[in-house]
Amino acid sequence: MTPDTSWTFAPGPALLVALLLGGYVWRWRAVRRTPSGARDAPIWRLLVFLGGIVSLSTALFSPLDALGEQLFAMHMVQHVLLLDVVPILLILGLTKVLLRPVTRLLQPLERQAGWWAGPVFAILLYVGVMWVWHIPALYDSAVESSAIHILEHVSFTFGGALYWWHLLSPIRARHGLAGLGPVVCMVVTKVLVGILGIFLTFAPRPLYDVYANGPRYWGLSALDDQALAGAIMAIEQSVVMGIALAFLFIRALGEADRADERAERHALDGQS
């Protein structure tokens, strides 16, 4: 039996993606024309951001969306795109200068939000959306109801964006992570979500009626499909953690080198 592989078009999400892309390209081009444009808006940042837009469009509009309603493994791919891949790429596409028009808006909002804008809440939200939406009753409802499905996607995207913002943001946050904070945050979060992936992989029976009672595709039983979905989650969490930790380590080394250079310049200025 062949699954439905039709493309999905929703005017609201399509408009938001278009505005996000248009706003970024407009700002990137404006910064690029300045004398320091090559440093403040490098081409690699643009390419990474475009990768995030492509990943977001793939999750929302490609056949992956329709396949996710028929195969648990495909729905899991959609989830990890929204929770990890999309926010990582979009945030890595930003710089302090590119964000300057909205920085003055973000800082007052961060002060007013208080604890809700901090890393502890971001961790709880990230882990929470993964675990809560995989409660069988909620998961089945999300697949069967368009409104709940949209809410699920919004919560995954927002949870991922807030979490990765604290780890990768190019601007200094009021409640920012310092020292080993990003490493601890990463390890704790990925282990907690990875446990869910392992549980799904080795569960003795299908947990979700929407897949257990549905037609089978590609020779996968409902239990095989569920095990594959769990493996995708667990492996993705491990791979993303490794890459992100390497990135954070390299960035920390770069910041340390720049701090040493500033200290040396300050010492030389003091001597003169």
Image: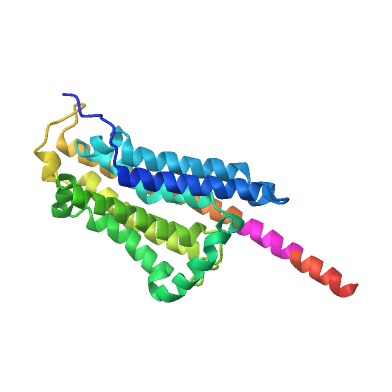
Q: Residue furthest right?
A: 272
The image shows residue 142, relative to residue 109, as above or below, that is: above
Q: Is residue 253 magenta?
A: yes
Q: Residue at x 23, y 54 (%)?
A: 133
Does residue 241 sit above or below 271 in this rendering? above
Q: Residue furthest left?
A: 213
- Residue name at image x 20 percent, y 51 percent: 147
Does the stretch in magenta take in 63?
no
Q: Position of residue 10 (x, y in %)?
A: 29, 41
Quarter of the image that includes the C terminus: bottom right
Residue 236 is drawn in which quadrant?
top left
Q: How is the image coloured?
A: rainbow
Q: Is residue 61 visible?
A: yes
Indicate the quadrant containing the N terminus: top left, top right, bottom left or bottom right. Answer: top left
Magenta-colored span: 252-261
* Closer-to-camera residue (127/144): 144
Residue 85 visible here: no
Residue 245 drawn at (x, y percent): 50, 53
Instruction: Indicate the position of residue 143 as horizontal and vertical percent values.
Output: 18, 45
> Which one is in front, 27 or 117?
27
> Which residue is at the front of the view, 225 or 15?
15
